[in-house]
Each structure stands twice: as structure tokens, then as C-alpha cells.
Amino acid sequence: MYAGHAAVALALRWREPRLPIVPLVLACYGPDWVEVALMLPNPQAGTATYTHSIPALIIGAVLVTALWKLTRRPGAWLLGVGWLLHWPADLFTGRKPLIFPTPLIGLDLYKLPVVDFILESAVIAIGCAIYARGVPRRAELRRVIVMLGAALIALQAAVDVALSVMRNTEWEPSLASAGRQSHLPRTREHAWTGLRMRFAFRPSHTRREGEMATDGPRGIVTLVCLTCGKEKFFTSEVPAAVSCEQCGSTVFRTFATPTEPDEAAIDALEAQARSMAYGDSSPDTTPDDVRDLDLR
Amino acid sequence: MSLLERVVGFVAAQYRWGLHPLKLIVALTAPVLIVYLADRRVRQIAATVAAEEERVRRLPRMRRR
């Protein structure tokens, strides 16, 4: 979460108006500041374990509370709470470590910038509304608070626009810990299988299964060009626009061939099967059909 | 190119070129600055309002009318 942390600070400020806002906002962004400090000599990856994991957050919260208590000013506990609330806020937008570098937990909404913008805007609106409860009901004060919320939302919008431009990886939310088994049956794949797989355990093949999940049984899709008869095969997903390399036609006849046993597909194939042996009678040909053919 | 497009392009370029710590510092300072300025303004207005109410309260009843 980005601007949402500032909204959390505004909401906490309502509890203790004597607490200066700057330390409170800095505490709400505390783990991010520590992460930046660890990156300062040289940018490096993997510092989130020391800044955003739960033990690191608890240590940071205790330290900042103790330091503020030394100044004998009110509201030290709010700084600690603000530091701790960084983790649940980031749970929505990113993927953060629990204790060790893996697994990473979070809804990863930074990969869905529109959803992230809506969520953070809502958090900012709520934070500003709670902050407004702590000030006198005057129109000019309300105007300043509305401008504050608008500025934070604009800041968030700039970040989300940038995120949508730089997005180069897929949305990969993760809520379950490694090794957890989904309670849902796995005998048949459904349309929502991809969604379920995103929230289930994450072995090495999980992502591939999510990508392969379709409405029906898995298999090979064959497109036969109606103009020239050229065949095209697809094992995962048929693109929205396909054209024939041979003749340029865009009209195809589609055949799905399951590659895994599926009762419905087996039944359908058996019902449609026709004997190819010489001399066999066609199973669906009635005596009347034969008589009609003989008359021609 | 409009101003908005320039701003969006600039922000997007910053991300495309990588997240340097200095950029992160700027990104983290911006909300702190916004909240600080707004809170300072709120306090100023609230103090003015309180002073005005106190002044009115101390006026003799006849003059208040």
C-alpha cells in the first residue's frame, strides 16, 4: 500500500490529537523507510525479510514506541500501532514475508492497478473521515481535509498509472502457506480452477495448471481452415484472432481432442464414432435411407 | 503533449528505469509532506476559530448582541 499508509496515520491521529502528525506518518511508513535505508549503499533484493516480516515489524514497533516514550510525549503506543498496521495494509497490495524470505503472502493488487487505486482511495476516504472527526465542524476545515484526501488520491493515481505502464508480470496473489491442500475436489477442472489454484499451495507446477485451466477437459484444440484445409494445433489456449498461414483465411472449424480421461468426452466420442471398416454398415443409417439412396 | 501526459510519462519513466533508493525516498517523502502541510493548515484554522470563539465568549453580553 502506498498512500493508504498516510490514511492510516490520519485515522490514528484521531485517537491522540496531541501527537504530531509527522512522526505518526513516518511510523506508518516505517518498514518502507528501513527498507530504503538498507538499500542505500547499493540497491539489493531480499531486504523485505528484515523490514516487512512479522518479527521485524514487532521489533520496529517496540523500538519506535520506546524511543518516543523517552521524549515523554503522549501517543507513543500509536506510533507502535501505526508501524504494526503496515503489514495488514501491505497484505492487500503486495506479497510480503511472514517470517522467512518465503513464502510471500499477499493479494498482490499492485499487479491490478485499477483495483489497487479503488482500494487505496477508499482507505484514504475513510482515513480522512476519521481525521475530520477530531477537528471542529467548520466549512474551511472540511475543505482542507477534502483537499488533503484529493492530493493523496492523486498521488496514488500517479503511482498506479506508473504501475500499469511498468507491469510486466502476472497477478500472483498468495494467501495459503506452503504445503496446504485445498479442500475443494480436484476430479474435474472448472472455470474457476485458475482462481482456486492461485490461492492454494504453490508447488512448481501450480502456475502452469492455472494457465491451462479452461472451461472443459484439457486437450488439444485443432483448427481446420475452411478454405484450404490446413490444420493448426493449440495445447493451452486458442488466441482470439487466428489466421491461416497458407491462405490467410480467418474461418476455421474447431475440434477439441481431450488428452486426459473425461467421462463426458468419452461418452460423446463413443456416441459419435463410426466404423471405418470396409463393408460395415453405418450405424445410423435406416432401411428407409438405403431405399432413398437406391432410388437416386 | 499536454501537461498531464508529460507528468504521467515522467512518472512512468521513473519506474521503467528502475527503483533507485533516491526515487523511493522522494516517493515516501511526498505523502508525509502532503499530510504535514494539510495538518498544519488545519491546526492554524482550528486555532483561529478557537481564538475567535474565546474572544466572543469574553465579550459582555450586551456587546455580543
Image: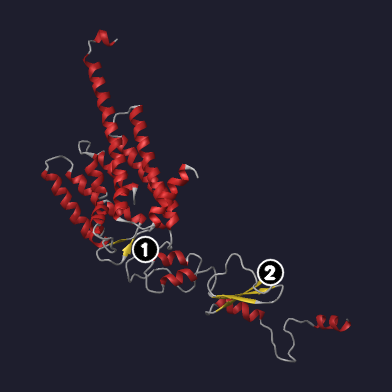
Q: Residue furthest bottom?
A: A278
Q: Is A68 on the left-hand or right-hand side of A98?
A: left
Res. A139 image quadrant: top left
The answer to whether residue A115 shows anywhere in this view is no
* Residue nearest the viewer, comparing A160 with A42: A42
Question: Which chain letter goes with mark 2?
Answer: A
Q: What is the number of the mark on residue A249?
A: 2
- The spot of residue A82 in percent (x, y) is 24, 48
What's the distance in space between the residues labelled 1 and 2, CA to CA?
42 Å
Rendered residue at 47%/69% (across/down): A211
Badge 2 marks a residue whose secondary structure is loop
**Please, is residue B44 above or below residue A197 in the view?**
above
- The spot of residue B2 in percent (x, y) is 49, 43
First in residue order: circle 1 vs circle 2:
1
* Residue nearest the viewer, comparing B48 with A245: A245
Q: Which quarter of the image is occupied by the C terminus of chain B?
A: top left
Q: Is A110 on the left-hand or right-hand side of A42?
A: right
Residue at the disc numbered 1: A174
Q: Amino acid at mark 2?
A: Ser
Rendered residue at 32%/56% (across/down): B20
Mark 1, Cα crowd under 10 Å, few <14 / some 14-19 / many 20+, is: many
The answer to whether residue B57 shows anywhere in this view is yes
Badge 1 marks a residue whose secondary structure is loop
Mark 2, Cα crowd under 10 Å, few <14 / some 14-19 / many 20+, is: some
